[in-house]
Amino acid sequence: MTLRETGLSIIHPFYNDFRRLPFHVKNWGSYNPESRSKLHFVLVDDYSIRPLIGVIDVSVVENLYVYRVMEDLRWNTPGALNLGVMQAPTEWVCIMDSDCMFFPENLEKLLDFEPEPDKFYYFKRQRISDTMPEKLLLDRYLPCAILMTKTAFLNIGGFDEDFSGAHSGGYGFFDTDLENRIKVAGLRRQVDGVFIHEYMEDIMGPNVHTRERVRNKGLINKKLYYQKIAGEVPRGGKLCRFRWQREWPVDYSPADGPS
């Protein structure tokens, strides 16, 4: 079945990325109404200084879900993505960073794509910048933009939250770790002809690693990554090891909340 038939949840983590929200809302509004009806937009607020629900106008976006991590965990992107995937309303999900999106032409191609439910699909990028032409040359596959089923994601173990800075003291490599497990299992695929547009910092504002100067912290998680591969350090285990709540829509029962 195509994604147009099954439906698709697009998941973005946000951490103080308020400048980026209007870009997404405008882009979602440019989608064909019939295509947009097949989509669900899942935003995960990783304990921003202002709750995301107070920044975005939820009334202008159909099929919008907003979740908020309720603990100030440093560099918790793997946990935020785990939460987004696990709470997505559809079996097929696509995770992306907050500076990435599908433009309408690529969204239409994606919805007509017929993926295999046990595979993980990666996309090439097309970068956008007004003042950084050197950045536009990079078009390799995005490490943290993946189309997959929730079942496949959970079967592979999800993102290892040991890579969150609150646990390791380091930054990054959670996506490298997941991709390695996917490759070892022989499940990595690519989607040809469907691109994700990635905005550079001169347009959307600085990324977390720029704002918080975490470059050297990457060495900590790089070491942890190789320790995990070698079996010297066990897997992190349970996903979403933090308190969270759903902020939109608000009409849900306690059973839908955090466990």
Image (cartoon, rainbow, N blue to C red):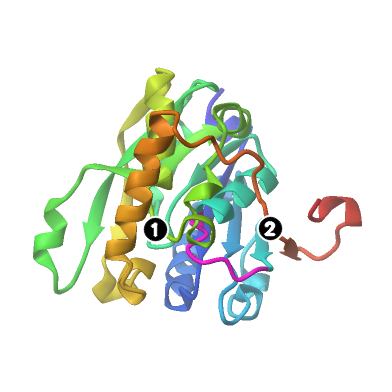
Direction from residue 141 to residue 232 in the image, left or right = right
Residue 73 higher or lower than 104, as above or below: below
Other-residue count near label 1 (Cα within 10 Å), few / some / many at <14 / 14–19 / ≥20: many
Residue that carries the numbered disc 2 in the rendered image: 242
Q: Main secondary structure of the magenta part?
A: loop
Direction from residue 249 to residue 156 in the image, left or right = left
Badge 1 element = loop
Residue at x 37% of width, y 31% of height: 180
Specify which label sits upstream in the sequence, 2 or 1: 1
Q: Position of residue 211 (x, y in %)?
A: 35, 76
Of residues 195 and 78, the one nearer the viewer is: 78
Numbered mark located on residue 113 in the image: none
Screen quadrant of the N terminus:
top right
Q: Position of residue 79 (x, y in %)?
A: 57, 53
Badge 2 element = loop
Highlighted range, magenta: 71-77
Residue 77 in view here: yes
Residue that carries the numbered disc 1 in the rendered image: 171
Residue 197 higher or lower than 107, as above or below: below
